[in-house]
Image (cartoon, rainbow, N blue to C red):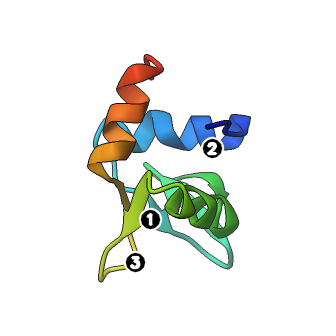
Amino acid sequence: MRLSQTQLKVMRWVGKGWSVLPGAGSAVMVNGRRVCNVDTMHALERHGLVQQDDARCWAATDQGKEFARSLGL
């Protein structure tokens, strides 16, 4: 599976257990900083690496955590 640099950056955060929050407009935030947009998160969802909860926050799936570990993220 090939991911973009932005997708890899997001997986560094969510692979370690951080939640990714929706921001203003299409922004996606981690620790108060914009890291990507919702299109990036939807692409990661299609790969099965993240899932969105009822509060619209994204977190890594078990597959996503394993993927991040395998890349040393």
State the image quarter where residue 23 is shown.
Answer: bottom right
* Residue displayed at 43% across by 39% down: 13
The amino acid marked with disc number 3 is Arg
- Residue that extends furthest to the front in the rendered view of this protein: 1
Say few, some or many: other residues with alpha carbon within 10 Å of mark 3 (under 14 / 14 to 19 / 20 or more).
Answer: few
Residue placed most toward the observer, 65 or 55: 65
Point out which mark residue 56 bears.
3
The amino acid marked with disc number 2 is Gln
- Identify the residue position indicated by label 1 in the image: 21
Residue placed most toward the observer, 1 or 35: 1
Separation (CA) of disc 2 from disc 1: 15 Å
Place of residue 53 in the rendered image (x, y in percent of width and height, measured from the top left): 31, 75
Point out which mark residue 7 bears.
2
Q: Is residue 8 above or below residue 32?
A: above
Q: In this view, does 38 lie above or below 13?
A: below
Residue contact at pointers 2 and 1, CB within 8 angstroms: no
Say few, some or many: other residues with alpha carbon within 10 Å of mark 1 (under 14 / 14 to 19 / 20 or more).
Answer: many
Place of residue 38 in the rendered image (x, y in percent of width and height, measured from the top left): 63, 68
Instruction: Identify the element where label 2 is drawn.
Output: helix
